[in-house]
Image (cartoon, coloured by chain):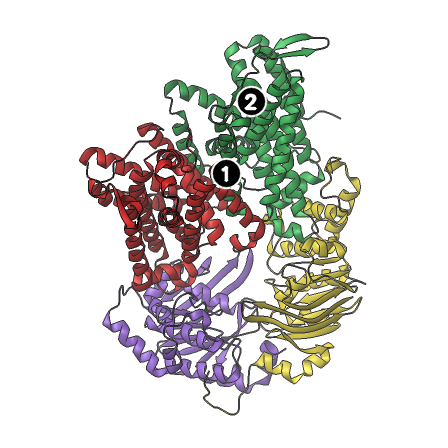
């Protein structure tokens, strides 16, 4: 069937990303790695907030648990292939997401927000206090010299930026594609029905409780993976990964891009990383400027960049949307 | 089909439903009428599991459903519509129907395949939409439909579940007289051979649809019978025309 | 003419509940709005009070259009509202509920004390319950309280929604006596209730509504006498 | 932005020596009472606004922190605690009214999520500003000279005078607030508006101004809490995170929008903190969260009030 405009642009994008480290300079490659990791995190948050309408304010907990779990496995099992530690991060995020989902199962709206925030602060307090396992205040390091061996490609060190770029790119594309696929399945549509009208979904015979648990677990898996990738990139993990400001940064990314649709968080994370980079070169108080920008955005334009582009596109109406193949972005 | 034995419901010390006994036979069209605040919607919410009864039991096909959650009761074969429009407003009409049909086939939590690949669900959705006359509005967001079309979708979603017992809560609420007639026609056509319980203020709708009527007043059933007995029933007249008082006396409140 | 409602259209989301309703109330006159359930009687009162503002049409009170004003401004202009669900403040005592009825009188001035004592002299039942929480009052007492609370603000026009709803016949009789007294004091009243006997006796003019519009205008006596009208618009 | 501090870390290290001599139960009870009262000063404003406008105002707790830092700043300039006690709460009241006027009223009704994001964002901004001006490590604030030392309560029990002062002052402030709410016309309007906003409106009460007044009073109370806590806990940007968690515990346990529930819950949380720190220090940090988890699991419909 004739590939639509959208699939062509998608393929083009992937090719560009694949060739990027060869032509782009080191600085941007470095930034792109961070953008990929945050994109996975932001998309995992979209599954909760944007797609299912669950206002979870403690997403940093899932990210942090994944980071710590993979950090501990990296240290304890030095011969384990690095890819497996990323999966370990994902699985621990899944478990943590499931548990949080279970505890806050019947909370909605405001109460879900402060319930999840409280639980994430609890996990932060555990990480901060449990010095024996998590290294407490100073966190954990010690896997920067790690080598990754591939049967036919040879050995690469974690400090080799180009290798790390492809390693992270692979996982990021896989995660985003999986999330995208999930939104297209019956389960995905059920999640949107919960966002739109949880009460009616209940009366249609949909087991809303189980659906919420599944999406918390799935989102936890994704966030855990992005946590695991992040520590490979930063070569260290610390309690600040888990605290309120990290959850807030995830919110900032989602709102900048527009938390109501799939592309929003991805665009938001790229904008966030680049803003963070340039702002911090002017003042080390970039977090403050980001915060003010966020509040202004919420007050005056909460829909985000992607919606802005869409409206602009609709007015320009050059993107023809054929009946059948209508991708709800 | 549906039996209520001595069902009561208290909010604090306010007895909204007191010792209600009701029976709905298979294939029957039963109407529940009564003045505002008589407890009609509360009774509906008790049957569909939104509230738990404070006393008494509810049997559906002689299984006790008192303590079941709404989604469990719906899966047993009871579907309901709502007095206040309660549809998925920011999703298209087609998506509203597709969610319902997917739920009917118990596939809501499946993630093995893409939803567009499920041809059967697409056909069934389009079939029900055409019966409800909403096929031309397939791709419109449900919230932007006209009020009577939203009413049709509201009833359509309940019917799409193909339930054994259909509960309709004031399908004609807020509709103009001819729109009401259209909805009544639709309900009649779509509930052939099904058991129907309907709550309605509009008397023409009630007499047009119902085989049996129960009158609810202050949480108790005061009269039950065919439309003609109800029209002739004295207590019902009094409820509807207000208390015609002969003797006057000041009493302590 | 104290109040002129001209062609108001009111919507709940997209449901067109009032379709061009017009009515008038003269100074000191009592009118009644009758009709079956769900025809928009309460919505008409809520539109006048600004709780559910009409999208089109105007509401002239002493020739000033109140159509899009906030309820507290309309209340301060002199329109009192007695809601269908009574809506007394359960956590406040009877006296505190009455104080809420006063307009901007901040603090405890003497005028308000006298007004409350006057009420208690007329209604000893309320007087005895002065310090009890309004939530513990019986249905009849709550109806009395909400009626008197609105009168505290000395309105020139009172909108009363289904006062006899859910009350036993004796208690309803007492409430209607109170409403008759309001009418005797020269306060205009728009009364919405289902009991024909009381409303038609008191009301100079009666409007009967069907599905969001007024279908009949006439005097209370006409409606009381004609079984045909009762059957067509009101009965089962 | 560094949240380095745990719940009440300084108090562990600094007065570890003082406490284990007097590890008698009554002292711990007093300890819990003091902290409970402090929490209630902040939680009361939060609960009232939640009841009145159905908004969980994260920024309200930032006002508490601003109160503490203003006290520090005023002490730097004038070196008089009493002057700070007068000025800082009033400044906080203004800040509270400004927040209500320009942010909360503007965002009110645009959906729960936007309201939460706005107040949460605002709280982060305020925390950042404080971090920028004062850095993130604790700044000591000297208690006024008259209140130093400790008082001999009975037999051999000594209790720091300053903490008694906190108890007395917060008791007086709460009594004053109780008087306003119970006896004055304004108090009646506030309570009525919290119970039925639309009916109060239909009776002629301008609920919008009532909300602003409530916001002002709440911020004033939070300001007082900030000022009197400064010498006790010292002033650090992590105060926000610690206090907001205690406030959430109070809301979770105390039920929504009810001042009475919030008061009892505050005292309970205060005692849990006080006893936890001493008896099970390692776990004390997450005690509050376990309490909340229990409440979420046991009576979620309880705290979520109206379960839509």
- Secondary structure beneath label 1: helix
In the depicted view, which residue is nearer to us: D106 or D156? D156
Residue D283, numbered circle: 1
CB-based contact (under 8 Å), mark 1 and mark 2: no
In the image, the chain rendered in yellow is: B
Q: Quadrant of residue D125?
A: top left
Badge 2: how crowded within 10 Å, few (<14), some, or many (20+)?
many
* Residue D281 can be seen in this image: yes
Q: Is residue D91 left or right of residue C93?
A: left
Q: Which residue is mark 2?
A: A230
In the image, the chain rendered in green is: A
Q: Quadrant of the C terminus of chain C?
A: bottom right
| Residue plotted at (58% across, 45% down) | A104
| Residue plotted at (33% across, 65% down) | C77
In the image, the chain rendered in purple is: C
In the depicted view, which residue is nearer to us: A108 or A227? A227
| Residue plotted at (54% across, 70% down) | B13
In the depicted view, which residue is nearer to us: D106 or A68? A68
- Secondary structure beneath label 2: helix
Image colour for chain D is red
């Amino acid at each position: 069937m004739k590939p639509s405009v959208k699939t062509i642009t998608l393929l083009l994008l992937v090719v560009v990303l694949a060739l990027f480290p060869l032509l782009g300079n080191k600085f941007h490659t470095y930034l792109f790695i961070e953008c990929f990791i945050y994109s996975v995190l932001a998309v995992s948050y979209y599954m909760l907030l944007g797609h299912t309408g669950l206002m979870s304010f403690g997403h940093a907990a899932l990210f942090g648990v994944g980071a710590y779990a993979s950090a501990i496995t990296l240290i304890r099992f030095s011969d384990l292939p690095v890819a497996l530690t990323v999966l370990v991060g994902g699985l621990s995020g899944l478990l943590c997401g499931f548990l949080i989902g279970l505890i806050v199962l019947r909370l909605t709206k405001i109460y879900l927000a402060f319930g999840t925030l409280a639980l994430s602060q609890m996990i932060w307090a555990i990480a901060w206090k449990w010095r024996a396992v998590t290294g407490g205040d100073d966190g954990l390091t010690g896997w920067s010299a790690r080598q990754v061996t591939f049967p036919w490609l040879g050995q690469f060190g974690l400090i080799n930026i180009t290798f790390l770029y492809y390693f992270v790119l692979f996982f990021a594309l896989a995660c985003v594609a999986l999330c995208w696929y999930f939104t297209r399945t019956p389960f995905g549509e059920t999640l949107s029905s919960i966002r739109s009208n949880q009460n009616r979904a209940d009366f249609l015979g949909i087991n809303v409780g189980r659906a919420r648990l599944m999406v918390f677990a799935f989102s936890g898996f994704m966030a855990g993976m992005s946590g695991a990738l992040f520590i490979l990139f930063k070569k260290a993990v610390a309690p600040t990964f888990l605290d309120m400001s990290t959850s807030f940064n995830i919110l900032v990314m989602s709102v900048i891009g527009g938390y109501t649709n799939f592309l929003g968080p991805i665009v938001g994370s790229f904008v966030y990383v680049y803003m963070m980079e340039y702002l911090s070169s002017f003042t080390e108080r970039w977090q403050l400027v980001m915060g003010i920008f966020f509040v202004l955005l919420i007050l005056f334009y909460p829909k985000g960049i992607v919606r802005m582009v869409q409206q602009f596109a609709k007015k320009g109406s050059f993107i023809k949307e054929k009946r059948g193949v209508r991708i709800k972005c | 089909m549906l039996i209520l034995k001595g069902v009561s419901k208290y909010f604090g010390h306010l007895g909204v439903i007191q010792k209600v006994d009701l029976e709905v036979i298979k294939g029957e069209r039963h109407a529940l009428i009564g003045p505002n605040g008589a407890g009609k919607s509360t009774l509906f919410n008790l049957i569909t599991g939104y509230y738990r009864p404070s006393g008494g039991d509810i049997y559906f096909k002689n299984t006790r459903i008192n303590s079941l959650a709404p989604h469990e009761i719906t899966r047993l074969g009871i579907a309901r519509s709502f007095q206040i429009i309660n549809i998925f407003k920011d999703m298209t009409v087609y998506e509203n129907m597709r969610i319902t049909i997917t739920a009917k086939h118990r596939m809501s939590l499946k993630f093995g395949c893409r939803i567009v690949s499920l041809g059967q669900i697409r056909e069934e959705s389009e079939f029900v939409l055409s019966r409800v006359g909403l096929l031309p509005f397939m791709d419109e967001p449900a919230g932007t439909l006209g009020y009577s079309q939203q009413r049709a979708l509201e009833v359509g979603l309940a019917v799409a579940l193909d339930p054994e017992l259909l509960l309709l809560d004031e399908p004609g609420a807020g509709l103009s007289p001819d729109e009401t007639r259209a909805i009544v026609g639709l309900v009649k056509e779509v509930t052939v051979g099904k058991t129907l319980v309907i709550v309605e203020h509009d008397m023409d709708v009630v007499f047009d649809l119902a085989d049996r009527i129960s009158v609810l007043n202050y949480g108790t059933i005061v009269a039950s019978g065919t439309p003609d007995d109800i029209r002739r029933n004295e207590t019902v007249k009094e409820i509807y025309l207000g208390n015609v008082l002969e003797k006057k006396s000041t009493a302590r409140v | 003419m104290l109040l002129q409602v001209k062609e108001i259209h009111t919507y709940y989301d997209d449901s067109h509940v009032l379709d061009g309703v017009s009515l008038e109330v003269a100074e000191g006159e009592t009118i009644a709005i009758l009709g079956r359930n769900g025809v928009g009687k309460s919505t008409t009162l809520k539109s006048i009070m600004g709780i559910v503002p009409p999208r089109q049409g105007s509401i002239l009170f002493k020739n000033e259009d109140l159509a899009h004003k906030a309820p507290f401004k309309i209340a301060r202009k002199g329109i009192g509202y007695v809601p269908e669900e009574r809506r007394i403040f359960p956590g406040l005592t009877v006296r505190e509920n009455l104080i809420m009825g006063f307009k901007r009188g901040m603090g405890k001035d003497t005028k308000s004390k006298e007004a409350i004592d006057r009420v208690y002299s007329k209604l000893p039942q309320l007087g005895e319950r002065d310090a009890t929480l309004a939530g513990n009052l019986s249905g009849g007492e709550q109806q009395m309280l909400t009626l008197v609370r609105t009168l505290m603000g000395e309105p020139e026009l009172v909108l009363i929604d289904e006062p006899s709803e859910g009350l036993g016949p004796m208690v309803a009789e007492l409430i209607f006596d109170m409403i008759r007294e309001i009418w005797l004091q020269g306060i205009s009243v728009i009364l919405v209730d289902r009991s024909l006997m009381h409303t038609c006796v008191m009301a100079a003019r009666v409007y009967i509504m069907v599905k969001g519009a007024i279908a009949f205008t006439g005097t209370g006596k006409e409606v009381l006498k004609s079984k045909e009208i009762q059957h067509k618009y009101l009965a089962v | 932005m560094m949240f380095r501090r745990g719940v009440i870390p300084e108090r562990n290290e600094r007065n570890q020596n003082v406490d284990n001599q007097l590890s008698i139960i009554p002292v711990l009870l007093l300890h819990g009472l003091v902290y409970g009262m402090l929490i209630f000063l902040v939680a009361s404003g939060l609960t009232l606004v939640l009841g009145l406008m159905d908004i969980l105002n994260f920024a309200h707790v930032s006002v508490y922190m601003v109160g503490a830092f203003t006290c520090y700043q005023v002490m730097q300039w004038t070196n008089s605690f009493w002057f700070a006690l007068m000025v800082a709460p009033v400044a906080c009241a203004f800040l509270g009214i400004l927040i209500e006027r320009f942010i909360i009223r503007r965002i009110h009704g645009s959906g729960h999520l936007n309201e939460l994001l706005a107040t949460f964002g605002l709280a982060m901004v305020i925390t950042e500003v404080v971090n920028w001006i004062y850095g993130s490590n604790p700044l000591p604030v000297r208690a006024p000279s008259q209140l130093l030392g400790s008082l001999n309560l009975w037999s051999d029990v000594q209790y720091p005078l300053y903490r008694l002062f906190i108890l007395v002052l917060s008791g007086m402030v709460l009594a004053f607030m109780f008087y306003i709410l119970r006896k004055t016309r304004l108090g009646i309007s506030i309570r009525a508006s919290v119970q039925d906003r639309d009916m109060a409106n239909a009776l002629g009460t301008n609920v919008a101004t009532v909300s602003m007044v409530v916001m002002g009073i709440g911020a004033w109370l939070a300001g007082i809490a900030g000022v009197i806590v400064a010498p006790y806990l010292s002033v650090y940007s992590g105060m926000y995170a610690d206090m907001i968690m205690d406030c959430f515990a109070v809301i979770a346990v105390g039920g929504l929008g009810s001042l009475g529930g919030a008061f009892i819950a505050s005292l309970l949380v205060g005692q849990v903190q006080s006893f936890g720190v001493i008896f099970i220090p390692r776990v004390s940090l997450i005690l509050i969260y376990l309490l909340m988890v229990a409440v979420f699991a046991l009576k979620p419909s309880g705290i979520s009030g109206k379960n839509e």
